[in-house]
Amino acid sequence: MHPTTIEINSQQFISNLKAIKEAIGPKVKFLLPVKANAYGHGLIGTAKLAESYVDYLAVACLDEGALLRKNNIQKPILVFGAIDEDQIPGLIDNDLEITISSLYKAKLVASFCKQINKRCRVHLKVDTGMNRVGVRPESLEALVEFVLSSNSFELVGLYSHLAASDDLDNSITARQIEIFKACAYMVKQRKADVVCHIANSGGVCYHPDSYFDMVRPGLMSYGYFPAKPIENFPLNQIKPCFSLKSRVAYFKVVPAGSGISYNHRYITKETTRIVTLPIGYGDGYRRGLTNIGEVLLNGKRYTISGTICMDMLMVDIGPSGSAYVGDEAVLIGTQGQEEISIEKMAIMLNTIVYEVLVSFNERIPRIYTAFSPSKQVID
Ligand SMILES: *Cc1c(COP(=O)(O)O)cnc(C)c1O
């Protein structure tokens, strides 16, 4: 097994899902976004864990949806992205629910469905203020009429996306919710059971009037708040479930004045002990953490020493630091009393938690801790 792993605390992940279910109540459906390798948590492993706790899964593109089906995931799966004409057969073959964001796209899908004599399940997307994809509210009615009059479609949902739900003091979200409310009313006049949804994590956390029939929290399901943490039950139960661990691969003592790693960006001040960990930017551990990233070793916090390489990085553990080849190193998560949070890492990298999570690639195996601590499932 590769000595560097991402460990997903299954128990904590499921607690997060349960807390969200509790918060939204029994009448609101729960769609879990598992796009981008489930925010780095591993697409298949995460979908399997979540399957019996959520109503829906969503992905960004055809390939992610097809992979879920190939791995026997049976839940309804919505594909968020704007579709490309040549993906239509794949979307229908894999029983994926398609986002229709214009009359033009609706006509393309309809003509393919007619050819193969199949119906497909669709969600219409209306743009209430993100100015990304979606029909304008004033064009929605014509699209709804077209979709309802064609027997190529089963109209399942209507949705939109919030542009600033993590910003607690502006009016964009309230305005988007108002516009969406009118759209939902219009659609439900024509088909009462259409599932209307607009809330992302920020909506779920800070805007209870955004819940409608279903919510789509991604970031929160994985344990992070988009802005300030919620202090009340049940959402205060939400915590990260993602740890990044490695093992000491090499150990050496070097004299004072030794330059460490490429371009000697770190120089030892005294005779000291340098350990090497088998993780680098080739795994998605960002090179921008050179000389600032942190590592926990034997319960102590150290700073990375020198340039992060493609496959390795070095840590100066000081003249009296102790570490042996094979010792566990934590790069995200807790060890003893110490913790390294992705939030802090994101600040160091001048980015957001989302981007740090999805940067870890397939080279790092995802391990799901089972409910009994002795049993582990590997993705
Ligand atoms: C990614 C995504 C979400 C989830 O967003 P979070 O901020 O992670 O909750 C919801 N809806 C759509 C359409 C998305 O693309």
Image (spheres, rainbow, N blue to C red):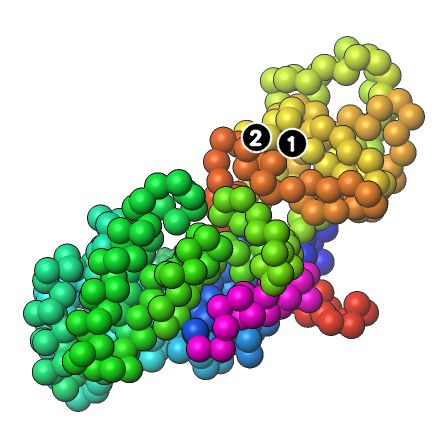
Q: Nearer the viewer, residue 327 or 140?
A: 140
Quadrant that contains the C terminus: bottom right
Identity of the residue furthest to the bottom in this view = 117
Q: Nearer the viewer, residue 226 or 56?
A: 226
Where residue 271 appears, as percent x and y from the top left, is: 86, 16
Label 1–label 2 contact, CB within 8 A: yes
Quadrant of res 80: bottom left
Q: Is residue 238 left or right of residue 327?
A: left
Query: Which segment is the magenta one?
Result: 9-27
- Pinpoint residue 202: horizontal percent, then vertical percent: 44, 52
Residue 14 part of the magenta-drawn span: yes
Q: Quadrant of the N terminus?
A: bottom right
Residue that numbered label 1 is attached to: 293
- At x 37%, y 61%, the residue is 210
Whichever of labels 1 and 2 marks the residue nearer the N terminus, that label is: 1
Q: Which residue is mark 2?
A: 348
Residue drawn at the location 36% of the way across and 68% of the way down: 212
Residue at position x 57%, y 48% in the image: 229
Q: What type is the residue that disc 1 sits on?
A: Gly
